[in-house]
Image (cartoon, rainbow, N blue to C red):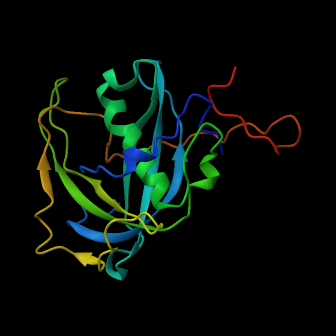
Amino acid sequence: MAKIGGDYVAEYENTEKQGGGGGILPHMYAKLQAESIGLPETKDGKGYQAEITFEVLEPEEFKGRKFWAYWTILHSDGYQFGAYKYGKPMFDRFGRAVGEQIDGNTDTDDLVFKSFVAEIGIQVGNANPSGGFYKDKNQIERFFYTDDAAKEPVPELGVIGDGTQGKKRNEAPAPANDNRQPAARPAPAAAANGGAAKKNPWSK
């Protein structure tokens, strides 16, 4: 697919601290995989997002259900940019959960179709400054790791309580994770040497 890019710096310590289709999934522990990852530019043109489609593998009753995340993973303003402050650590945690320490040479192909366990929460919709309201959406609240440094066990999969406890309300709307299905994007062009070397979308 595409390389993450040389400006992406691995920050393993960020993986420890966590925040934390078919309608909204309940609050639950689930086995997931990233079905696809795109790398579009941010709206301000100063960085890139990871546009990820997550698919539920287990529990069986929710198998095949999907939700979407938009995490800003590169931005020239660094941690002064709110969406990057949220998105970069989330992407690092995701990488650790699937067994990859993400850096500039990581290819998105290395991150898809690898299962991991996470807590799925519900972000309650609120007012959009441009008018209207954001709809409720699912988001990953916590990743569970299986490496030697993991500090907590992987939980039993399933709905937590009645499935509503994981609801949170945004204090301010943030575009880092949007439940809209991403529009189809053209596949990256193959490299001149027959595709063996893959270029990231911001290579010069």
Horizontal side of 43 relative to 202 (left or right) equals: left
Q: How many marks?
A: 0
In depth, the one of 72 and 192 nearer the eye is 72
**Image-quadrant location for residue 57:** bottom left
Q: In the displayed image of the protein, which residue is found farthest to the right?
A: 193
In depth, the one of 120 and 36 nearer the eye is 120
Where is residue 23 drawn, in percent x and y?
Answer: 26, 61
Where is residue 106 drawn, in percent x and y?
Answer: 62, 44
Where is residue 190 drawn, in percent x and y?
Answer: 78, 39
Say if residue 23 shows up in the picture. Answer: no
The quadrant of the image that shows the C terminus is: top right
Where is residue 173 drawn, in percent x and y?
Answer: 19, 33
In depth, the one of 153 and 168 nearer the eye is 153
Q: In percent of the image, x 61 and y 33: which residue is there?
A: 5
**Image-quadrant location for residue 113:** bottom right
Q: In percent of the image, x 12 and y 33: which residue is there?
A: 127
Q: In percent of the image, x 30 and y 78: which residue is there?
A: 157
The quadrant of the image that shows the N terminus is: top right
Say if residue 187 shows up in the picture. Answer: yes
Placement of 112 over or under 186, stated as above or below: below
Q: In percent of the image, x 67 and y 25: which residue is there?
A: 203
